[in-house]
Amino acid sequence: MPYRASAMVALLAGLLVALGAAPAQAGAGYRYWSFWEHGSGAKSWTYATQGPSVARPGDGETIGFRFAVSEDSANAVQPRGTADFGTICAGTPAKGGDKRVAVVIDFGTAADASGGDTPKKTRTHCARVDEGATAGEALAAVAKPLRYNSAALLCAIAGYPSSGCGEKTGKSGAEPDTGAAGDGDGDGDGDGDGADKSAGKSDDGGPSAGLIGGIAAVVVLGAAAVWQARRRRV
């Protein structure tokens, strides 16, 4: 391979190694209610893949909500306390045409609280609702008032927090959403995925795969052009 082409390839290899080895910068977190599911017979919580207004838990299942600061669903913290349906709904008998859904509400810690708010103690409820009810309807049956913002994001459960909605936190300070009340029928998934991300960066603050791929393509094309030009001279 001609010298210039080999030099370009060497540059590419060094660049990719440098990008891949660059330490990920800690991303900013978001303060929000995350939504979890604990199916009948499950051994642990599972981060919900649907919002509360879409998910329809079955009779005998448990749903959970946890208020905390986290970057995304990958590092979200689970609700604390028991998730056992039999324990939570022991005093609520079954009724034809209805279903029973255990609800765990973890208001989080003081470190995650919005300014001026004090977290409430973790609560559990047994919601007896219509067979076709969603998780959001089960939550509303036992933990009013709920608050949603104009984008239908679940902002507050049982009035907590008193203000804000999915605000960004970090060294730059919070960027609060006023959490204006919506119509209450939104997805309320609270996953923070709608937050803006800087172009060319991955979720963990490092360079994105797209950025690395784009740089690699430019360098490879450059090396190919040099090689072709060299061939024409030979």
Image (spheres, rainbow, N blue to C red):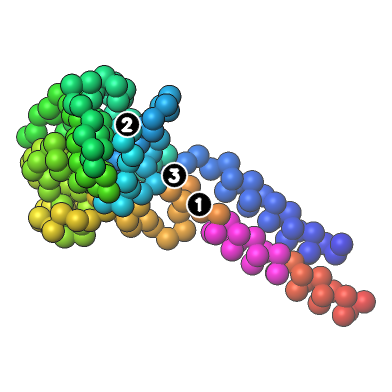
The extreme front residue here reads 96
Residue 60: give its label.
2
Q: Nearer the viewer, mark 1 or mark 2?
A: 2
Left or right, 188 with reference to 1: left
Mark 1–mark 3 distance (CA, rounded to whole Å): 9 Å
Q: Is any atom of residue 100 visible in this view?
A: yes
Point out residue 179 in the picture as x, y percentages from the top left corner.
Answer: 13, 52
Which residue carries the number 1 mark? Answer: 207
Q: Is residue 172 magenta?
A: no
Residue occupying the point 22% across, 45% down: 130
- The tag earlier along the polypeptide, 1 or 2, is 2
- The kind of residue tagged 2 is Gly
On residue 204, which mark appears?
3
Judged by depth in the image, the label closer to the viewer, 3 or 2, is: 2
Q: Which of 31/173 is in front?
A: 31
Residue at (36, 32) in percent of width and height: 38
Question: Which comes before the other along the chain, label 3 or label 2?
Answer: 2
Residue 119: percent from the left, percent from the top? 13, 29
Residue 162 found in image quarter: top left
Q: Which mark is residue 215?
A: none
Please, what is the three-letter code of the amino acid marked with disc 3?
Answer: Asp
Compared with residue 54, is residue 229 higher up or lower down, i.e. above or below? below
Foreground disc of the pair 1, 3: 3
Q: Which residues are magenta?
A: 210-221
| Amino acid marked by disc 1 | Pro
The answer to whether residue 195 is above or below residue 118 is below
Q: Secondary structure at mark 3?
A: loop
Magenta region, mostly helix, strand or loop? helix
Disc 1 and disc 2: Cα gap in Å? 44 Å
